[in-house]
Amino acid sequence: MNADEPIHADGKEARLRRLLEDLGGAVLAFSGGVDSTYLAKVANEVLGGRLLAVTGLSPTLPPEEREEAAGLAVTLGLNHRFIRTEEVGRPEFVANTPNRCYFCKDDLFRRLGEVAAAEGLPWVLDGTQVDDWGDHRPGMVAARERGVRSPLAEVGFTKAEIRAASRRLGLPTWGKEASPCLSSRFPYGTAIRIEDLERVGRAEAFLRGLGLSPVRVRHHGEVARLETGMADLAKVLARREEIVEKLRALGYRHVALDLAGYRRGSLNERPAARDGVAGTENKRGGG
């Protein structure tokens, strides 16, 4: 996205403010990402003390994301809290089927509903926007079943418009890279274990500390497959020994560099067909 593009979303923001005012109060699922931060900013201005931003804590959340969410809540002056989610205790989630995200979001939204009821707030909100509708997102099914509202999507905000509006408001998240949960690093059918989530999280934090962005550690048992931007491939090779040493210390036996570079949802790619026609990537929530 070109952040300097003249994207005019003032009319949508006005409609968003009216929608939020009509809601009267809400619990917001707050991840600290681009969408939920923009929604939190606007909702806090409209609802004030009738807004409670809640961040779910689990082993699938990288520690730095937790810290960023806490810092943003302070910066925005949000009424904010953390709650523990328990999706990693659900066999359906651990089995890591293509519908894995459903069980994660179902657990989160159930708990947010309980918080809303306890606080006397009538709604639970999330940061879904219209571009999300074109992707395979089982979590949206859970949101619908739990009665969660998506104000950004309801007034027609796209991702580009949210980024532009966020930049206009001076939000530090306007250019933030997407950061799907750590479970997206595991091929479907590979059981998701807490110790493996922690290993991936530590490996990616180390690699980001070397200046690699974007970067993903795809978990294939004893093999860590690294994906990063094409411009950073030379940087990885230049620090090859240091990277291999660190990831082996974390428990990986083999460290591989994917020469195709980072691409969203690479674990869902199909191999090329035998007639030479490349397979297509399906968008099943990979990060």
Image (spheres, rainbow, N blue to C red):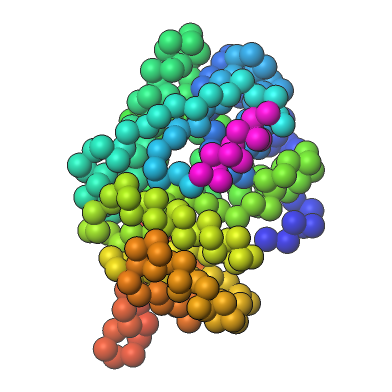
Looking at the picture, does residue 35 appear above or below residue 186? above
Q: Residue at x 56, y 46 (%)?
A: 64
Q: Residue at x 35, y 86 (%)?
A: 277
Q: Is residue 238 found left or right of 148 in the rendered image?
A: right
Q: Residue at x 53, y 56 (%)?
A: 205
The N terminus lies in quadrant: bottom right
Point out residue 236 in the picture as x, y percentages from the top left corner.
56, 76
Magenta segment: does it hold 68? yes
Q: Residue furthest bottom?
A: 275
Q: Quadrant of residue 207?
A: bottom right
Magenta segment: does it hold 210? no
Q: Is residue 277 visible?
A: yes
Q: Is residue 24 found left or right of 105 in the rendered image?
A: right
Question: Which region shows up in magenta?
Answer: 63-74
Looking at the picture, does residue 58 appear above or below residue 209? above
Q: Residue at x 73, y 48 (%)?
A: 164
Looking at the picture, does residue 182 appear above or below residue 274? above
Q: Is residue 218 visible?
A: no
Q: Main secondary structure of the magenta part?
A: helix
Point out residue 18 in the picture as x, y percentages from the top left corner.
66, 23
Point out residue 99 in the picture as x, y percentages from the top left corner.
28, 48
The C terminus lies in quadrant: bottom left
Q: Quadrant of residue 145?
A: top left
Point out residue 213 in the picture as x, y percentages from the top left corner.
60, 64
Residue sitting nearer the eye, 119 or 60: 60
